[in-house]
Image (cartoon, coloured by chain):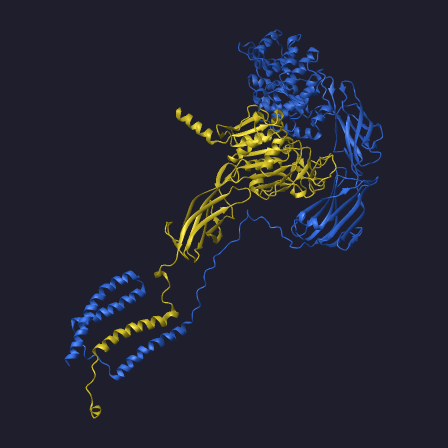
Chain colours: A blue, B yellow
Amino acid sequence: INAEYGEYFQHYYITNNLRMRVLVTLCVLASLACSLSPSDRDKISSVFNLPIDSLKSAYQVTVARSILQLPLLESSCEFVANNAQLTLADLYFASHISKIQGCQVDIAGIEDYLNSEIAGEGASMNTLFKAVTSLSNFGMTIDSSLNEKIAAKVKAEDTVMAHSLAYLATAVLPGDVPKDLVDSIEDIAHRADTIGNAMSFEGGLMETSMFLKGAAVLSLKAGKAALTDQMTQKFANYIVSNKDKSGKSNLFYTLVGLDALSSGSLVPTHLIVLDNSAVISESQRTLKVSLVNPLGVTVKDSTAKIVSAKGAGGQAIFTPGPMAGGDGMFEVSASELARGVFSAELGFELPSGYLAPDNSVVKVKCVLPVEMKNAAFKLIDVDDNRILTNSDLSGGAVEGKADLSTRLIFDFTLTDGSGEVTLHQVFVRFTNTKTKQNVFFIAQADLKKKYTIDLNFRSAAAKSFGSVGGEYSVDLIVGDATLPQAMVVDVATINLEVPDSKEPAADVSKQAKPEITHLFKEPEKRPPQAISTVFTILVLLPAVILLIVWVKLGANVSNLQLSLPAIGFHGGLLAIIASYVNFFLGVNMFTTVKYLAGVAIVTFLCGQRLLSSIAAAKKAK
Amino acid sequence: MEKAIVIALLLALASCRTLVILENVLTKESHSSFLADLATKDGDIVYKYATDSSLTIKKYGESLYNNIVILAPSVAAFGNGVAANDFLTFLDDGGNIVMSASSDVGDPIKEIAAEVGIEIDDEGTSVLDHMNYDVSDVGNHDLIVADSFISASVIVGDSPKPVLFKGVGMAADADNSLVIDILRASPTAYSHAANQDILEYPLAIGSNLLLVAGMQARNNARIVVFGSHDMLSDKFYNADAKAQGSAGDVQAAGNMEFASNVVDWALRRNGDLRYSNVKHNKVGEAPSDAAYRITDEVEYSIVIEEMRNGNWEAFKGSDVQLEFVRIAPFVRAFLVPDADGAFKVGFKVPDVYGVYQFKVDYNRVGFTHLYSSTQVSVRPFHHTEYERFIPSAYPYYASAFSMLGGLFIFSFVFLYHRDPPPTNACKSV
């Protein structure tokens, strides 16, 4: 819907007399900024710039720049001249640009076209609104009898948007405003949802802004405020809360809403603090404030004064009296400095037409440095009450040793110009120089504002230090919102001896684990080749010797007789030996057994025959 | 037509549904950028107000949503009797939760966080840091600039910019190892009510103080708690940040990128891992079911994919390890990824036989737990596979063969030897 209705907006350069009071109090309670700050304006301004790529964006840029009082862009006019057609939407955008920038729209038959759109039977509320406002923007005559048609249409459509458009259209019609329509403004406002301090319609920013704009222009014409102050405040809170949104359309409607709030004859004003100057310090003693309308435009011809500036202790840092500057920009220098938070109440004199901010109290923080004084850093041996280390820290950080029987007592005061003070953050930090682990202790101030840390390592070692010994550097951290800068004082380096000191185990469960390479069994060490060669020769020697001896002794095989059993027996024996060799060379055992089975039978039978024949032959001799 | 309806139904079932629980109407306005960003992550978003009487997260025993985003830090009680327990059940069912807290934190939010090991500090406290507050903070120094991000780019993105934070501090339960410290406070920060003196030790000080914490449960469901509701707002998204006292210019706060990345992670659009196509084989051979022999050279490969911005992409991690385990790991080696996400490594099977597992157990911060194990057996050498012709054993070979040769020759000599006829010299006796 946002884009759809985005086109229906009409911008008016007339003021309204709505009493729009956006109370600063309310804003403070809701912790909302109640108007645009200069940085907000810069941010928003940068959005409404080139490039212009559609009539709608030309229209939004032109209207937004006129609201922000920025120089208008010529390209908008050019874009209209080059692109505007004779359609309702185009004419609507073009008419606004034409009116604001004063450029000509050279399209024939605009008036007839628009009037025919109005006369059309099924003309919706937004058609009527567009046509009427276009006619008005172009300075053409409008039929005053349209009031009734609009009233009927609103009744038929009865949406918040239809009402808003009707208000805007009726406001430009000649003649009196129908009373019913003006009265309906408050009724419609009741349809809005209230959350906390903000009020908005279901349709969001665009619907709410359009309603505010319509209500503003219509009540101006009727000369009668239509919304209650409270409603206006809540709507304003809602509109301002949108200033940080991104997107051209969001910012456009934020501007439209703020403009509706800012363009009344009684404009509410807001007090804003410039340049973070609500923090007063020795180098920055000036509080700068600005009085602005909801759009962030400063109020001309105004003066301001300090009514009072009290702190919690009744001290004052500003002298009551007029503030320097004018035209909505004021500043005052602190007459004296005192650390703390102060409420500065300001008073204003404004030109007629402006409402003074209802709450004109600025919270001012005065920051001053503090110093550590009267420091006494002691390490005491509890067992024999012996002081191991005692220093006032004037010579910088001390070095010391501590074990379980040691007690650390460190006291000091913190002072600024006015004397001893207590601050929010006074911590003593132990940092393990190896593991970088921090251990904190809170220093407590006594009634005389003396800070003390009393540490007994016997109990603290396990509880606070986790039984991790080693070297610790000890700092004092002093921080507070009223210090220009937090302070870190290097106090000591302590070597803490803890029996069974544990190294804190780092969590390695979510890290890569060390690589593992399997260690293979080392092959056994083997003798050199030469030795095995020698032994090979040695083991072969007996066979050689046997042969030689046999030759010498005249061994022979003269009894050999070639017969089938002899061939079978010796062939079998040879085959058995061959299959052993084969087994050694690679055949597995089962194959070998298979071969052997066959060969063994033949060899056995042949051997039996051979041997018995030899035995028989011997007997025969 | 029917087909179209079926497809539409399937799509509806497959797509994520996200429930956004808003504190009130204003939340939608103040956090519009966050919600717009959420809408780009998940098209199917259901908005409900925290006190809505129709708030339901489970129906007929099934979760209605995949994700829940709770932008209702100070809600005192959810509508329709929805309690912290219902959200925990939702987590148990695998749903993801993102929620924001603030200094004004309500009990239900604290309760949910406490149950997942994240303790949120008491109502009214805020994180204070007198050293790293934003230059625009002229008040209590509770608008702080934080940059101690966890070093896990899958959660916070690459080189996140400092973010603005204003809210409540948290501490992790020391016994809960699943809590992830997404954003820590600086060493000088502490958590306390700004306007009260510190009389007791605060919930946490320094780096123990968490600003944004997460938890990934063992079922991989995730929950993230932002300690600051404001850090997700349009205001902070568009704000500038510069820590007081730090060098350099004011720069745009990194809240938007940070929050977007963390939410991407929390909604499991980043950091999900899955594996497929586990293969192992002997070098140079096709994968087979046969057992490996000791000292074989084997290759292992696994395809790992990572969810990146809602899409599965090849995982690029360089620290994935393969373990070859028989009770204890015998080999642990880094897997090397290629462009398609296939992680490979080769190694030599140990010389100890038994039943082993190829195990990839990848558990890293920010990623879901990836675990794959494949069982294989490793056998010893067959007796034919031992070494032969060992030079040092030549004497044994030679003696054995000379024995065999000797036997063969001896059989002739023994059987067929005939003594020569006796000579005269001998006869004389």
Q: Is residue B347 above or below residue B339?
A: below
Q: Is residue A442 above or below residue A214?
A: below
Quick one: quadrant of the N terminus of chain A? top right
| Residue nearer the viewer, A345 or B396 | B396
Residue at 64% x, 55% y: name it: A500
Residue A561 visible to the viewer:
no
Residue A191 visible to the viewer:
yes
User: For residue A360, what is the image quadrant?
Assistant: top right
Q: Residue furthest left?
A: A620
| Residue nearer the viewer, A576 or B45 | A576
Question: Is residue A533 found left or right of B336 in the rendered image?
Answer: left
Residue B387: x and y, percent?
A: 37, 64
Residue A109: x and y, percent?
A: 57, 13
| Residue nearer the viewer, B227 or A501 | A501
| Number of numbered labels in the structure image | 0
Residue A208: x and y, percent?
A: 63, 20
Q: Residue furthest front?
A: A383
User: For residue A262, what is the image quadrant?
Assistant: top right
Question: Is residue A271 found left or right of B15 in the rendered image?
Answer: right
Q: Is residue A54 above or below residue B241?
A: above
Residue at 44% x, 56% y: name it: B348
Quick one: quadrant of the C terminus of chain A? bottom left
Q: Residue furthest bottom?
A: B428
| Residue nearer the viewer, B225 or A528 | B225
